Image (spheres, helix red, strand yellow):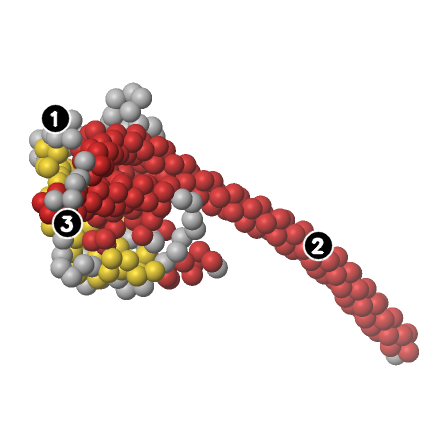
Amino acid sequence: MDPLFQDIRRIRLYVWGSILFGLLLLYLALSWSFRRASHTILDQNLALARQTDELRQAYDELTRAQSHLVQNEKLASAGRLATGVVHEIGNPLASVLGLVDLLLRCRGRPQDRLECRENLGRIASEITRLRGILQGLLDYARPAGRVLRPVNLNGVIDRTLLLVTTQPSFRNIKVIQRMQDPSPTVRTDDRLVQQILVNVLMNAAQAMPEGGELTVATAQGPAAEGEDGVTVGKVFAPGDQAATITVGDTGPGIAEGDLPRIFEPFFSTKETGKGVGLGLAICHSIVEELGGAISVRSAPGLGTTARILLPTDGAAEREAGHRAV
């Protein structure tokens, strides 16, 4: 039996040796695999970190480019407005000069002194009007970061109309204002809202070269549901509260095939040389930054109606927080 037991012991030694050798090989293989996987994960993490940095830099560059584009469009609009402002300034200046000439002829009689006081009042009124036009143009063109504060929408519309109605394109247009009283108030950036309004109002006026009616209205309440046409920006849920600026014209309207494309960059239905198609695209960008929306409804022969919706529930502050993150 001894040879048998000796064989069994040798077999056991072979088996245990094989098991230990297999375990050693398995350990070495797993160690090598884990080490290789670890290096791969580290390399992927480094690559992901580099891509994150590149994406962050690209995002920052896009943000700066967007800001520059908005400011450039504002300056271009200010340049177009300045042409009409210069023309408009001539009328009050002529009145002021004429009234000053009359004042120089005043004598000491009571009726002359009364006439002088009336003329002085007219001079003050014309100078105040001039100052309002020039100050409005300077405020509109001045670069500034987004500043959220309570804004009286009726006041923004009054300032904007004072600027744009000086343009030759408004010469034969009747402007009708239907403002809610008291005025809707929303926490937003009034200069950005004014930039949207300038583009929308100028487009409406240019659509009526032979004259017509332009209606501007404000309202506050639940956002309208099921709006026809094309809408960009925030999707308002049923019951969401919004302040609304509505601009409607009696122009020829927008062709059905063109309406879905009006917010595309460089798309324009104007004649060559009268626009590059960036105005409404920039309005789209601005209204998204403000947490609002723009809706345009139009049909050939029935005019065009644009509605600017601004949230009254603090969406602009939440949007600012998301961008900061």
| Residue pointed to by mark 3 | 217
Query: Measured from the top left, where is residue 265 in percent x and y?
Result: 35, 34
- Is residue 156 found left or right of 319 in the rendered image? left
- Is residue 66 found left or right of 221 in the rendered image? right
| Residue pointed to by mark 2 | 39
Between disc 3 and disc 1, whose residue precedes?
1
Between disc 3 and disc 2, whose residue precedes?
2
Task: Give the image quarter of residue 92.
Answer: top left
> Badge 3: few (under 14), some or many (20 or more) residues near its Cα, within 10 Å?
some
Mark 3 touching mark 2, by CB under 8 A? no
Residue under the point 52% across and 47% down: 60
| Residue pointed to by mark 1 | 210
Query: Measured from the top left, where is residue 145 in percent x and y?
Result: 43, 51
Residue under the point 52% across and 43% down: 61
- Residue type, label 2: His
> Badge 1: few (under 14), some or many (20 or more) residues near its Cα, within 10 Å?
few
Label 3 sits on a secondary structure element that is strand
Query: How far separated are the C-alphas under marks 3 and 2?
Result: 64 Å
Query: Measured from the top left, where is residue 210 in percent x and y?
Result: 12, 26
- Residue type, label 3: Ala
